[in-house]
Amino acid sequence: MTRPAHSTPSLAHALIAGRCPRCRHGPIFASTWRMNPTCPECRLRFDREHGYFTGAMYVSYALGIPLIALFTFLAWLVRRDWPIGQLVLAAWLAFLPLVPLVFRYSRILWIYFDRAIDPEPPEKP
Ligand SMILES: [Zn+2]
């Protein structure tokens, strides 16, 4: 399917909307937890190789730990009398609803990062 060039979303808009890094139209995720194996629009394969999303775990860590640290700090502002273990537990509980969002954006950011530094698909054996 061809689209007029002016209808292509910006890189930032496509990233935030979770769209394919190549065509910027096809959704990367089919549902909250399930990814499309390929872009429904341009057929770009999102999972390039076995273990591809191991790198997304680092992105997930980079997104999650600052949020948990922030939530721990906010809990400390509210309950300074609690021990640190209880504050961290409260922060983890506050973080739980954000897990699907962090999961999605860790993979989306990983795909965009990987495609930026290595845009060509791997060679077929
Ligand atoms: Zn695409």
Image (cartoon, helix red, strand yellow):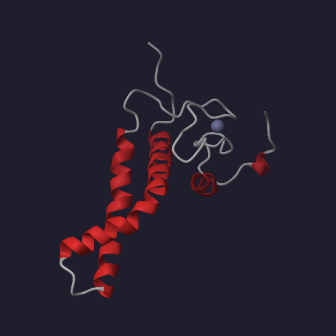
What residue is shown at x 45% (from left), y 41% (from top)?
A: 114
Of residue 116 and residue 59, the one placed in the foreground of this image is 59
Q: Quadrant of the C terminus?
A: top left
Asked if residue 100 lies left or right of residue 4, the reply is left
Q: Nearer the viewer, residue 84 or 7?
A: 84
**x and y, in percent, of residue 56 in the image:** 39, 45
* Vertical comparison of 116 with 11: above or below: above
Instruction: Count all numbered tags in the image, as a single digit.
Output: 0
Q: Quadrant of the N terminus?
A: top right
Query: Which quadrant of the view contains residue 92?
Result: bottom left
Between 124 and 66, which is closer to the camera in this rendering? Answer: 66
Judge from the rendering whether residue 44 lies leftward or rightward of residue 94; answer left or right.
right
x and y percent of residue 67 in the render?
Answer: 37, 67
* Residue at x 63% of width, y 57% of height: 13
Image quadrant of ligand 1?
top right
Outermost residue toward the top in this view: 125
Q: Quadrant of residue 93?
A: bottom left
Rendered residue at 62%/46% (across/down): 19
Give percent across and percent down for residue 10. Answer: 66, 54
In this rendering, the answer to whether 51 lies above or below 93 is above
In percent of width and height, residue 3 lies at 80, 41
- What residue appears at the point 46 percent right and 36 percent down from the top-left corner? 118
Give the quarter of the image for residue 24.
top right
